[in-house]
Image: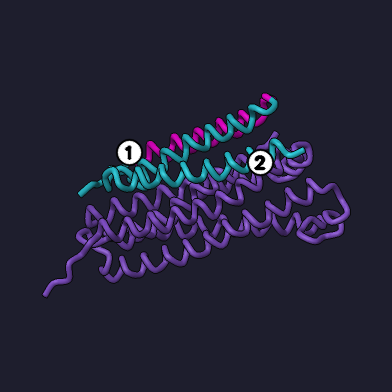
Amino acid sequence: MHIASYGRLLGILVALVALTGVTVAASYVDLGAFNVWVALAIASTKASLVLIFFMHIGVEGRLVVLSFLGTIFFLSIMIGFTFWDVAFRG
Amino acid sequence: MRRAADHQGTRLGMWLFLYTEIVLFGGLFVLYAVYLSTYSSDFIEGGKSLSRLFGAANTLILLISSFAVAASITAVQKTQKKRSLLCLAVAICCGLLFLMNKYFEWGHKIHADIYPGSETLAYGAPGRNIFFGLYYVMTGLHGLHIVIGMTLLSVALVLTARERVTAENHVLLENVGLYWHLVDLIWIFIFPLFYLVL
């Protein structure tokens, strides 16, 4: 059985709180259109930490990891194709 | 005859359900992305009128609650029942705090005549109307998930107290935890997109 130690969980919490601080700080710097991408990159990092260390996505083996990535893949198709349409409307 | 327990299958079922939740919120994020690119200035203005302090506080509250749920699973595995119950109680209290903040936030906005169908929004800029429409739908749907999550955490708390959730069989607690973490994950994306758009 996989048991996560309290220390490691606490470490992840500290990292998540620190990244929240970073994303708030980054929002005060004007990067134009890049602000959204920076925010998304930090949010994805935080999401990965939660998935790996709090949700133990890897414990189940490849099945859950691959099916999760599949979900994200189809989500990106949904987003990508929508923009493909919207961007080229006359 | 002992019933065969398929914990792995039970957890897999939960993950499959979580995928549908991801796509549910994903659709709303697509709407957000398309309208952000169409009405950037209205979205930026709308985002600035939301309280960063409340948004950041709620982010911290959810992160702490996620940690508490993860720690409660560790505690159950180490047969530390009291600590596990304490962690679950902390997580439920965090959910309650989150909803209280949301109540004040929404109340403040509704008081300022900003809610779906209000005159300020209906006769104002279309982008502003869409921003706050999405704000209410997404934070509202997320809030509903918090309520459901708190209910599930309470069930897990009672079952842990009655020793129905044990070190040998705690798949129920694990699945409740997965749900709660997903609610946290969604907020991790809602927070920067709504509160921090420059």
**Number of numbered discs:** 2
Q: Position of residue B155 (x, y in %)?
A: 39, 68
> Residue at horizontal 49%, vertical 55%?
B21
Residue A29 against residue B168 in the figure, above or below: above
* Subunit ID for the residue under disc 2: A
Residue A42 image label? none
Q: Nearer the viewer, residue B10 or A18?
A: B10
Chain ID for cyan: A
Name the quadrant of the C terminus of chain B.
Answer: top right
For label 1, the residue is: A8
Residue A13 within the segment the image draws in magenta:
yes
Q: Is residue B86 magenta?
A: no
Q: State the image coordinates of residue B125 (x, y, percent, origin top left).
A: 84, 47
Residue A64 picture location, percent across and down:
33, 48
Chain part drawn in magenta:
A9-31
Of residues B106 and A67, the one nearer the viewer is A67
Q: Is residue B14 left or right of residue B167?
A: right
Question: What residue does disc 2 label?
Answer: A85
Q: Residues within 10 Å of mark 1 (few under 14, many from 20)?
A: few
Of pointers 2 and 1, the one earlier in the residue sequence: 1
Rendered hue of chain B is purple
Q: Secondary structure at mark 1?
A: helix
Q: Label the magenta part by its dominant secondary structure.
A: helix
> What amino acid is found at the position of numbered circle 1 in the picture?
Arg
Q: Residue A47 appears at what percent x and percent y?
A: 46, 41
User: Residue B3, located in which quarter of the rendered image?
Assistant: bottom left
In the image: residue B25, left or right of residue B180: right
Around disc 2, counting alpha carbons within 10 Å, would you say few (fewer than 14), some (14 to 19), or many (20 or more)?
Answer: few
The residue closer to the viewer here, B121 or B32, is: B32
Chain bearing mark 1: A
Residue mark closest to the camera, 2 vs 1? 2
Amino acid at the residue labelled 2: Asp
